[in-house]
Amino acid sequence: MEHFKNRLKQSLTSTNLVLEEILEPIDGPEGRVVDAMRYSTLGGGKRLRPFLVSETSNLFNVGRDSVYRVAAAIEMVHCYSLIHDDLPAMDNDSLRRGKPTCHIQFDEATAILAGDALLTKAFAVLSDPETHPEPEVRSRLCSLLAESIGERGMVGGQMYDILAENSNLKLSGIKRLQLLKTGMLIIAACSAGGILGGADRETMASLQIYSENLGIAFQITDDLLDVEGSEGKIGKKAGKDKAQGKATFVSILGVETAQKNAKDFVIQAVNSLKQFDEKADTLRELAMFVLNRES
């Protein structure tokens, strides 16, 4: 586990260095939106999605410069989604990563613009030849991300989440909701590593199975933390899902069954990596980390 923690720390540090470079402060009135982008992107976070890009691409010995630019792009999309998710029109949260949310720290209009700018910046990075010399690879990365976060992906999941409040959602519904809202960007992170590494169709399918199961396990533990975690550890308000009438894995299954389900999904994620050698050990350890996380 110590090896895993060191690799996670290394990935976090390398991703942050790239983000610092990409999100360089600027002068003038427009500098305020960059300040908000930096505040929401550089102020903490586990960098799970960048780590997935890093570790899946490591299976194919991909150069690190390309890896961390792609990782930074996906993290910017994740941070954009958090900014918008926290807005009064969405979840109306005041705390994120242990500090005031973007619209509280700045204002609502600036937060909306910061999210918009992070999203567009991500595609600027992916389409830049500095990220990868091959136009086809850059095009595939852009298409992957667009399909993962649009109306049939993350944004569609957010719409589903809003409409599902105070509804009698079944287990199949919550699985689909969370696959779209949370899982699709996790799948994209793993698939991006495969694209960078020139993985064949069979290998890409294995990475998708791993990331789908990991994404569901991640969301179940997130739901458990909302019930059992403390605000100090999770960095956001606990108990808000129940307060907002949201259907979750825990509200449908109960704590014990949800815990068992999370473990089952982690086992399926680990089993999907059988075709890989010890290079995938960190991905296996990551699955266990997701299962046992406290924040």
Image (cartoon, rainbow, N blue to C red):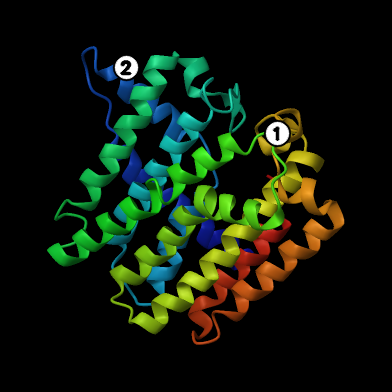
Residue at the image point whose x is 54% and y is 65% from the top: 212
> Where residue 104 appears, x then y in whole percent?
52, 16
Vertical order, 108 against 18 (above or below): above
Secondary structure type for disc 2: helix
Q: Which residue is drawn at 39% across and 43% down?
A: 77
**For the residues carrying marks 1 and 2, which lies nearer the camera in this image?**
1
Does the image show residue 167?
yes
* Nearer the observer, 228 or 181: 181
Q: Earlier in the sequence, mark 1 or mark 2?
A: 2
Q: How many numbered markers are drawn?
A: 2
Give how far across and how far down residue 261 sits, in percent. Answer: 75, 64
Write down the residue under mark 2: 32
Local crowd size for mark 1, using a 10 Å CA cut-off: few (<14), some (14–19), many (≥20) = few
Q: Tell me residue 124's x, y (percent).
A: 21, 44
Image coordinates for residue 24, horizontal then vertical, percent: 27, 31
Above/below status of 166 relative to 224: above
Please state if 283 lies on the left or on the right of 295 as rendered: left
Look at the numbered disc 1 and give the secondary structure of its residue: loop
Q: The C terminus lies in which quarter of the figure?
A: top right
Q: Identify the amino acid type marked 1.
A: Asn
151 left or right of 289 in image: left
Q: Nearer the viewer, residue 11 or 98?
A: 98
Question: Label 1, on which residue?
Answer: 166
